[in-house]
């Protein structure tokens, strides 16, 4: 049965890939440094801290044995565990996004700053509930970035869902949707550019930030070290193979790394908004 758990680990690792990619906003904002990634938990070459995210689930042994009775080939068991794995992947992805956007503090007080806390530029912004407020906010943010020698072909705007909804509904007469105008500005008037507006619950209402899009050219400003992609570990509780419950653990480790910092240790490549 031990080999079966190992096989299920591998199956689950592969099965959660779509969840990890489709659910993550953070990964859209920062390019992964493939050269420094994949070194294993606690082995980031970039900083002394890996933001390790983990979630666990327990399957009572009686339930596990009932699943096995449903199908002697273990197909039913695998499907049920995959269901658990997908939910765990969603939780871990949310934690990784929180790390990328806000940051993470270890039990011993070591801190990794995310986009909002590392922002070296700041402006109150303008009310997204009033037509034109979002456009003025984005234009101001890009102006501040340029004035600090941060140049990019395209930019991303990240805001709370409340402001996203205000922007999405913002219109001034027929065919004057403000969302489209903001996209136009983020992409520097380039049709079909990659600059986007993202909504995340990891930002407080009324706050947001703007930053260059994630691509190889902008890795000079920031990149992501993924020491370990989320990986499953299945084991018997207390090592009891006969009666122990089945413990599922999903663990990943990432470190957002910011370069070109100012003397205060903050990034001039991120402009945050505090009252939009």
Image (cartoon, grey):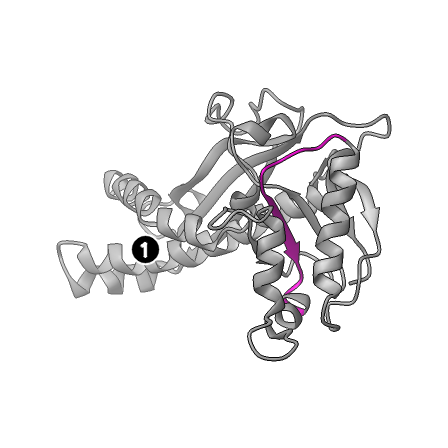
| Badge 1: residue crowd in 10 Å (few <14, some 14–19, many ≥20) | some
Q: Above or below — where is 166 with respect to 57?
A: below
Give left or right: position of 251 versus 178.
left
Q: Residue at x 67, y 62 (%)?
A: 160
**Most distant residue in the bottom direction:** 173
Q: Quadrant of residue 113?
A: top right
Q: Residue at x 55, y 38 (%)?
A: 214
Give the x, y percent position of residue 12. Answer: 32, 47
If the image is split into quadrants, where does the N terminus sit?
A: top left
Q: Nearer the viewer, residue 157 or 26?
A: 157
Q: Nearer the viewer, residue 242 or 201?
A: 201
Q: Above or below — where is 43 with respect to 124?
A: above
Residue 158 magenta-drawn? yes
If the image is split into quadrants, where does the C terminus sit?
A: bottom right
Q: Quadrant of residue 167?
A: bottom right
Residue 33 magenta-drawn? no
Question: Mark 1 = which residue?
Answer: 82
Give left or right: position of 246 versus 225.
left
Give the x, y percent position of residue 127. Answer: 78, 67
Q: Nearer the viewer, residue 120 or 233?
A: 120
Secondary element at image label 1: helix
Q: Residue at x 56, y 63 (%)?
A: 180
Q: Nearer the viewer, residue 230 or 236?
A: 230
Q: Quadrant of residue 183?
A: bottom right
- In the image, the segment drawn in magenta is 149-162
Give the x, y percent position of residue 247. Answer: 42, 50
Residue 12 in view of the camera:
yes
Give left or right: position of 189 versus 264.
left
Give the x, y percent position of residue 7. Answer: 25, 41
């Amino acid at each position: 049965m031990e080999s079966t758990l190992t096989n299920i680990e591998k199956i689950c690792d592969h099965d959660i890939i779509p969840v990890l990619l489709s659910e993550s906003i953070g990964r859209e904002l920062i390019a992964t440094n493939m050269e420094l990634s994949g070194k294993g938990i606690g082995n980031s070459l970039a900083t002394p801290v890996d933001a390790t995210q983990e979630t666990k689930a327990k399957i009572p042994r009686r339930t596990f044995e009932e699943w096995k009775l449903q199908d002697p080939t273990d197909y039913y068991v695998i499907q049920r565990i995959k269901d658990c794995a997908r939910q765990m992947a969603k939780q871990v992805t949310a934690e990784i996004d929180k790390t990328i956007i806000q940051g993470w503090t270890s039990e011993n007080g070591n801190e990794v700053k995310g986009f909002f806390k590392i922002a070296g530029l700041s402006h109150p912004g303008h009310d997204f509930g009033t037509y034109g407020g979002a456009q003025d906010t984005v234009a101001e943010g890009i102006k501040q970035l340029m004035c600090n020698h941060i140049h990019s072909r395209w930019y991303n705007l990240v805001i709370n869902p409340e402001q996203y909804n205000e922007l999405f509904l913002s219109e001034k007469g027929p065919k004057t949707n403000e969302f489209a105008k903001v996209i136009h500005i983020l992409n520097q008037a380039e049709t079909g550019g990659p600059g986007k507006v993202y909504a995340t619950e990891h930002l407080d209402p009324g706050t947001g930030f703007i930053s260059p899009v994630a691509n190889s050219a902008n890795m000079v400003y920031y990149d992501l070290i993924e020491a370990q992609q989320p990986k499953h570990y299945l084991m018997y509780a207390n090592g009891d193979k006969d009666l122990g419950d089945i413990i599922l653990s999903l663990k990943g480790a990432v470190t957002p790394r910011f370069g070109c910092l100012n003397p205060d240790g903050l990034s001039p490549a991120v402009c945050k908004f505090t009252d939009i």
